[in-house]
């Protein structure tokens, strides 16, 4: 007689976004089919006693294989990036698909699918980055893509070559209004940044630290206010990504108080790093150059408060990895001359969950259910991943089993990404995802890779539930 289940995860503490309870989880044909006490035997069994059984993490903000300027190469492709994500307890990632100027969205997507197909260790889907919102892109292409399951897109208020002006942002938001898709906004005022860069360079102040001083809080606050106002004019919900500080948080709170639907996102760098890290020895500060930049201790506290009180719905990595000691990375020839040419972004897809678990759950700042909501359940709701983000009957069997007693010191040598450093090197962590299951298949077992490249698949998405 065949077993009742393909896999049973037995005796663990299951957590959802609302409850925590002891149970067995029965899995068949890639889905969770039963949750209860003393389930019958599975063909395969995992003893999860003393461990937490959580939905696999969904990291809805990662950059993989993204073109990043002449001579610059991102440190992770889909293989290394999703392998790293998997070891960090994630089962789904949402990378960006960058539309280059003059490029059709379909063309961009075809290229990204070709890079991802057969190479992923986690499930994945794509957000579009709209850099060239022509009439045909907004009138035909983007609505057709939304109908095909690409139900979110990002616009930038900064970065030359990427940023859109207010009129273009309004037009792009209008596509969201017409289709029900979701707009994500990177909020920093490019003109203000350029003005400040000019002043710093005129003074010969070109070291990495100047990256933070040329992107001060006011630059993010103003752009956040403007993005929220534009969304209000169009009357659409909006995601404010990678929020770094209290005044930007206040803008989100104020918009919500006016009845606006705003999804707030923050990231580990705004909890764990400060602008002082950009001082570094010599040019070491380049390792921490990302945008918005990390701020100060008060901003870290504000971001924690935002996580605790519900200002933030989602906690993502903004994994955007470049090697440090590499002419195609942070220390490219121009980057060694001025902070302006240091590629923006830091690695973090593997450390996102352990950092929030250790600093948040283990230190009593958030409970396990809030952790689950911030790292999986809310991402699934916001981005239309209908069968993901919950340990519940009918859901994909995407599960991370956590050992709350595991103690590790973050060392890049132990991580699985393609960068040559971690910005979180040396941080002590309590709690680590030791076993990871994707669609019922054990991908990582007690810290060892058991899955195969290509096990992770593309998932079309429904419209957001916001
Ligand atoms: O510095 C960052 N965050 N780079 C990634 C691109 C982005 O803006 O998300
Ligand atoms: Zn951004
Ligand atoms: Zn990003």
Image (spheres, helix red, strand yellow):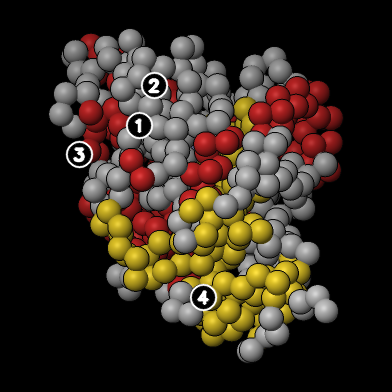
Q: Secondary structure at mark 2?
A: loop
Looking at the image, do the residues carrying marks 2 and 1 touch, with CB atoms under 8 Å apart? yes
Earlier-in-chain disc, 1 versus 4: 4
Q: Nearer the viewer, residue 137 or 280?
A: 280
Q: Which mark is in front, 1 or 3?
A: 1
Q: Which mark is in front, 2 or 4?
A: 4
Looking at the image, do the residues carrying marks 3 and 4 touch, with CB atoms under 8 Å apart? no
Residue shown at 61% from the left, 73% from the top? 45
Earlier-in-chain disc, 1 versus 3: 3
Few, some or many residues within 10 Å of mark 1 (<14, 14–19, 20+): some
**What is the C-alpha distance between the residues marked 1 and 3?**
21 Å
Does residue 77 sit above or below 272 in this rendering? above
Tag 4 residue: 48
Few, some or many residues within 10 Å of mark 4 (<14, 14–19, 20+): many
Tag 1 residue: 420
Earlier-in-chain disc, 2 versus 1: 2
**What is the C-alpha distance between the residues marked 1 and 4?**
34 Å
**Drawn side of residue 360 relative to residue 120, left or right:** left
Tag 2 residue: 329
Q: Nearer the viewer, residue 433 or 249?
A: 433
Earlier-in-chain disc, 2 versus 4: 4
Residue shown at 41% from the left, 38% from the top? 347
**What is the C-alpha distance between the residues marked 2 and 1?**
10 Å
Residue shown at 57% from the left, 72% from the top? 46
Q: Position of residue 106 (x, y in %)?
A: 78, 26
Few, some or many residues within 10 Å of mark 2 (<14, 14–19, 20+): many
The numbered disc on residue 276 is 3
Earlier-in-chain disc, 2 versus 3: 3
Quadrant position of the N terminus in the picture: bottom right
């Amino acid at each position: 007689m065949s077993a009742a289940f393909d896999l049973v995860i037995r005796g663990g503490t299951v957590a959802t976004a609302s409850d925590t309870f002891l149970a067995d989880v029965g899995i068949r044909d890639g889905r969770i089919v039963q949750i209860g006490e003393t389930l019958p035997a599975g063909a395969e069994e995992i003893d999860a006693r003393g461990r937490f059984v959580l939905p696999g993490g969904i990291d809805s903000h990662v950059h993989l294989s993204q073109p990043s300027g002449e001579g610059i190469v991102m440190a992770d492709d889909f293989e290394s990036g999703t392998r790293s994500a998997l070891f960090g307890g994630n089962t789904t990632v949402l990378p960006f698909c960058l539309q280059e100027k003059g490029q059709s969205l379909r063309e961009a997507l075809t290229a990204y699918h070709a890079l991802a197909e057969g190479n992923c260790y986690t499930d994945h889907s794509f957000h579009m980055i709209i850099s060239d919102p022509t009439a045909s892109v907004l009138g035909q292409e983007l609505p057709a893509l939304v109908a095909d399951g690409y139900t979110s897109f990002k616009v930038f208020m900064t970065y030359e070559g990427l940023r859109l002006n207010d009129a273009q942002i309004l037009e792009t938001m209008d596509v969201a209004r017409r289709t029900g898709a979701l707009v994500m906004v990177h909020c920093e005022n490019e003109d203000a940044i350029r003005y400040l860069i000019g002043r710093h360079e005129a003074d010969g102040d070109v070291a990495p630290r100047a990256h933070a001083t040329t992107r001060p809080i006011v630059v993010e606050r103003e752009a956040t206010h403007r993005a929220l106002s534009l969304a209000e004019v169009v009357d659409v919900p909006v995601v404010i990504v990678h929020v770094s500080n209290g005044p930007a948080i206040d803008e989100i709170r104020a918009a919500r108080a006016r009845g606006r639907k705003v999804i707030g996102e923050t990231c580990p760098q705004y909890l764990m790093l400060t602008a002082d890290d950009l001082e570094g020895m010599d040019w070491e500060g380049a390792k921490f150059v990302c945008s918005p930049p990390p701020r100060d201790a008060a901003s870290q506290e504000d971001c924690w408060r935002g996580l605790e009180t519900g200002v933030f719905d989602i906690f993502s990595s903004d994994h955007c990895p470049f090697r440090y000691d590499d002419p195609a990375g942070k220390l490219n020839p121009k980057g060694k001359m001025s902070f302006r040419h240091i590629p923006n972004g830091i690695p973090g897809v593997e450390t996102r969950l352990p950092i929030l678990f250790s600093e948040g759950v283990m230190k009593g700042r958030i409970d396990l259910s809030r952790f689950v909501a911030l790292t999986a359940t809310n991402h699934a709701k916001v981005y239309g991943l209908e069968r993901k983000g919950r340990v519940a009957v009918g859901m994909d069997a995407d599960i991370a089993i956590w050992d709350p007693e595991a103690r590790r010191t973050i060392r890049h040598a132990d991580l699985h990404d393609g960068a040559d450093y971690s910005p979180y090197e040396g941080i002590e962590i309590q709690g680590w995802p030791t076993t990871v299951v994707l669609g019922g298949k054990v991908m990582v077992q007690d810290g060892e890779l058991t899955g195969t490249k290509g096990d992770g698949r593309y998932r079309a998405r429904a419209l957001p539930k916001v």
